[in-house]
Image (cartoon, helix red, strand yellow):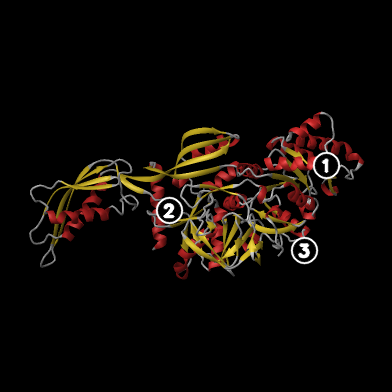
Amino acid sequence: MAKFDTERLRNIVLLSHSGAGKTILSEAMLHSAGVTSRFGSVEDGTTASDYEPEEQQRQASIQTSILLCPWRQHKVNVIDTPGYADYRGELISGIRVADGAVILVAGPAGVEVGTREMWRMAQERILPRIIFISKLDRENVEYQEVLDSLVESFGRQCVATQVPIGSEADFSGVVSLLDPDADVPPEMQGLVDAARERLIEAVAETDDDLATKYLEGESLTTEEIVGGLKRGVASGAIVPIMVGAAASGTGVTELLDAIVDLMPSPAESPAVKATGPTDQEEVTLDCNGAGPLAALVFKTAADPFVGKLSYVRVYSGTFKGDSQVWNAGKGEAERVAQVFVVTGKSQEPVDELAPGDIGAVAKLSSVLSGDTLSRRDAPITLPGLDFPTPVYQMAAYPKSTADLDKITSALSRITEEDPSLKIVRDPDTLEMLLSGLGDTHVEVAVEKMKRKFGVEIVLETPKVPYKETIGAPTKVEYRHKKQSGGHGQFGHVWLEIMPLSRGAGFEFAHKVVGGSVPREYIPAVEKGVQKALVDGVIAGYPVVDLRATLVDGSYHPVDSSGVSFEIAGGHALSKGIKEAGPVLLEPVMLARITVPDTDTGEVMGDLNSKRGRILGMTPQDGGTTVIEANVPQAEILRYATELRSQTQGRGTYTVQFDHYDVVPGHLVQQIVDARKEAEAARA
């Protein structure tokens, strides 16, 4: 593998709405660069980037892939990201390590929901951008309409640098507006001249000297236009719009040329802020080999052949094989045996990674995505990765006894590979909950665990942790008496039971006077009461938010014992709950839902149908609104999928537990029946 200096590196992330054709574009780039001898196919599962069986089965990307694409003595690291919303975590890690973005727009579809989201994410990272309109050889493509919609959606900084020759089946090539000597079909001359004039105007606006020259009527040279264009791309003042058809390779070499000529190298990208050896000490890292080592682990994969594979982007220093690095976040040293550059699943060993380069290291035990690798004598920590909060939960059960012993390890390893997955054990239902960004995200994780770790997991709808309480105070007596020859059993108690405020839990007190219940038996009464709280009288759910006070009772000098009073206390509480107006409680969540203004009415109507209570609405920049609402947990177990459908994928939300509230009376019997059915199924 040839060595490339930092100035000859380009780290480019491909972004688009799902299905716009990023994988085929990356395949065309590899083929044009001579990396592959034949053109891979998504349908046949032969592309370099979609190499996981789960991707080939779905014919869609589900993870970020790194593709090494040498072009004109430069090394282009193409970062192919999934467009599907369930894999936003993969997208975040890919954008984080890029120095520029190519936003792909499918000609027949134009600007889609995902296009706007990708633009927003690239803009937040202040990434230089190129827009590539592809699939111009398809039916129902009107180039000018797509161009106009891009300018309308993202601003006048979006400027064409190419014009397509022909359309649909007659699409045959592109005319570069940067080349004054380009061959232009006569019927297109007017269009090309107008587009070139718009490009020159945009370039002139980015530079005072060029603007003066332009306004004075002088012509800008090709070198001045290209130089101004590069500066405009770097600053975000210009976003070139290019055209082509990835499936046929048309326009792909021109795109690679533009990446090399217009996109910044890591050395030209802004310096990175990090935390130095002293806590809270901010250091600025320039991308050069003389600086201290700082490499971000942005992706972790469980490779079936080499074990855990850590993908790194070097921000400072040189990352060498056969060396030792320091994981400052974990406070552990790691041995680096071999460094690789990767193209999809192919790995090629190299001696080192230059500053700004991307590669991979195997078998780093303490390292996870978001960690920084540096030197022990100069520990540096780069800002980590902020993964989205999971919103879709399923209960995970081992399919068989053989899977039981392996399920914990498999779940741990899959969350290492994909930090946007989370594993928690619900303290109330004792279920292991696997959380992700959507149904597909969780289902694919289960498929991966079966393939990679040999564990079969069954997903079930999570149980709702209902609880029970009382609605009124009561006083109850229970006498436990049993005689069977010899010493019998005797325990007699009076309990006062009072409801407490929501969330107060359980309290036990005693006001026994005169020794009616000996002091040594009071803890036994409390123990019996505690045991009775486990199974409520409505549907067998735990009982909360009440105070039980032992106020009186009696004992037998021979037959009384701790066990007798424990039994009496438990039965007394159960009897008292039945007499104190028992009620069923359900968890109510606080949901914060961000939706386009056009979808606000439909989303609010849906929340009302789910027994939601709207707490407020806050308009946001960019034509969105945040809706805050309390919604019963039982009503939003599938909300990730439902919201996506209502908003065409544009809506997002977060949810957290807020409080418990009384279940409406007309729903109680349904819950009781469902509980009985579940218990019968387990029996």
Residue type, mark 1 in image: Thr
Contact, mark 1 vs mark 2 (Cβ under 8 Å): no
Label 2, on which residue?
Answer: 463
Q: Residues within 10 Å of mark 3 (few under 14, many from 20)?
A: some
Image location of residue 215, percent across then percent down:
80, 29
Kind of residue at disc 2: Lys
User: Where residue 379 appears, x then y in whole percent?
Assistant: 50, 56
**Which sits earlier in the primary sequence, circle 2 or circle 3?**
3
Secondary-structure class at tag 2: loop
Residue 120 visible here: yes
Q: Which residue corresponds to the image point at 27% horizontal and 47% vertical from the top-left?
A: 506
* Res 222 label: 1
Q: Is residue 222 above or below residue 421?
A: above
Residue 142 visible somewhere in the drawing: no
| Disc 1: CA contacts within 10 A as few (<14), some (14-19) or many (>=20) | some
Q: CA distance from mark 3 to mark 1?
A: 36 Å
Say if 575 sits above or below 559 in the image.
above
Instruction: State how far apart marks 2 and 3 are (Cα).
Output: 51 Å
Residue 474 quadrant: top left
